Image: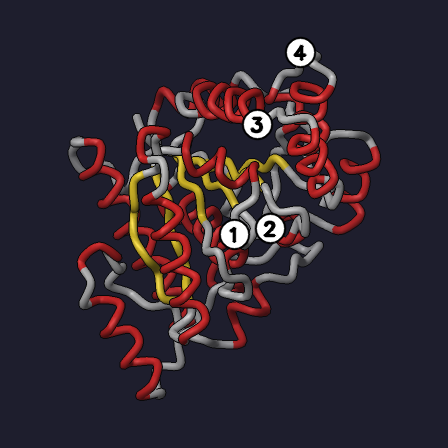
Amino acid sequence: MRNTIAVMNTKGGVGKSTIVSALAETLSCEHNKNVLVIDSDAQASVSSMLMTVNDLYGLQRDGLTIVDYLVARILHDRPADWADYVVRDVSDVDDARSVYLIPSDMQLTLFEREVSKEALHTGLRRTIADVLQKVRPVFDIVLIDCPPGLSVLTESWLREADFHLSPTKADYVSVCGLEVFRRFKALNPEMGFAENLGVLVNMRDLSSLVDTEYVNWLRSNPENRCFEISIPRVNALQDAARFQPQQRSYGAKYPGQVGQAIRTLCKELLLRLEAANGVGASVDTRSSESAAQVGEFEGMPRAAG
C-alpha cells in the first residue's frame, strides 16, 4: 500500500512540523493507526515536539538519529538497520501510544554538504528508496517532515515517497513557495515524483478577508487539490507544539476549534489515501498486518518522557 507522505513547502514558517506532529498524534489516538514520523529537518523541530529535549539530546549524543543512519549507509558504506534508529512511545498524548519517530540532528546539514561534495546523490536516493520500501509494510502511515527549500535529501524524499502534502499560509510569500515547488516538480519528470495529496491552508485568520481571498484563489486551481478544512491560527496549536513531560489527554492538547479542525483533516487525509490506493473505507481500524509487524520491533528505544 502506498502510505509514505513527504510534508513540505519551499517556504518556511508555514507550521509544517506542527501539522506533522498533530497529524501523527490524531491518527494514532483517533484512528488507531501506527504512524512513523521521519524527521528530515536539521532543526529537529518535530523531534522536540514529540519528546523531551533531554531525550533528544541523548539520542543525538548516542548516534541514534537519521543523520547517523545516513552517514553509516552513504558516507561510510556500512550496513545499518533502520529499525535501530526508531524511537517508540513518543508523544505526550496519553492515548497516542502508536507514534514512532526517527529523530533528526543539526548535523544533517553537514551530511548533505558531504553528499554534494562527493557526488553521492545516486547512493542517497537509493538508500532513501530502500528505507521507504522497508517501512511501508510495517506502519500504516509514514510522515516525512522535510525542511523548507529543496536540498538533495528533500529531493530524494520527494522522488521516492508515494505522496506529498504541502501546508501553506494564506499569504503571498507562502503561496509563492508553492509555485517554486510546482516548477521544481515539472523538471525531469522521467526521474519520478510523489503524487500530490493536497495543499493545506494552515494558520488561517478566519476573520480576515485577505486570508479568505487567498484561500479562494488557491482552491480555484484544481491542481492544488486543496483540503476542504483550513487550520485556524489559534494559540492552542502553538501551545501543542511544546512537549510536556506530564502526559495529557488529546482534548487538553487540541481543544475546541483546533481539535475539530485537525480531526476533520485526518479523516479527509485517510479518505484521499484510500481513494489513491483504490481500497474501501478503513478510517477507524488499524491494519492487523501493520500492528503485527510493529509488534516485532519492541526492541526499539523508548522515549523516557
72 to 266, vertically: above or below: above
For the point 40% across and 46% down, the residue is 27
CA distance separating discs 1 and 3: 29 Å
Q: What is the C-alpha distance between the residues marked 2 and 1? A: 6 Å
Disc nearer the start of the sequence (4/3): 4
The structure residue drawn at horizontal position 26% and vertical position 60%, both measured from the top left corner, is: 226
| Tag of residue 121 | 3
In the image shown, does 204 or 87 lie closer to the viewer?
204
Q: Where is mark 2, residue-wise? A: 46
**Label 2 Cα crowd, 10 Å radius (few <14 / some 14-19 / many 20+):** many
The reply to whether discs 4 and 3 touch (Cβ–Cβ < 8 Å) is no
Q: Which of marks 4 and 3 is in front?
A: 3
Q: Distance between the residues labelled 1 and 4?
A: 30 Å
Q: What residue is rendered at 30% in x and 40% in y?
A: 195
Q: Name the residue under label 4.
A: 79
Residue type at mark 2? Val
Task: Tell me the kind of residue under disc 4.
Answer: Pro
**3 or 2: tag closer to the N-terminus:** 2
Real-space Cα separation, disc 4 to disc 3, in angstroms: 18 Å
* Amino acid type, label 3: His
Neighbor class of circle 1 (other Cα within 10 Å; few <14, some 14-19, many 20+) is many
Of mark 1 and mark 4, the one earlier in the sequence is 1
First in sequence: mark 1 or mark 3?
1
Circles 2 and 1 in contact, beta carbons < 8 Å: yes
Estimate the spatial distance between the alpha carbons at disc 4 and disc 2, rounded to whole Å.
27 Å
Q: Do the residues labelled 1 and 4 touch (CB within 8 Å)?
A: no
Q: Name the residue under label 1.
A: 21
Query: Which amino acid does the dot numbered 1 rest on?
Result: Ser
In the displayed structure, 149 sits above or below 231; it is above
Ranked by sequence position, the earlier of labels 2 and 1 is 1
Where residue 286 appears, x then y in whole percent?
Answer: 35, 32
Residue at 42% x, 70% y is 169
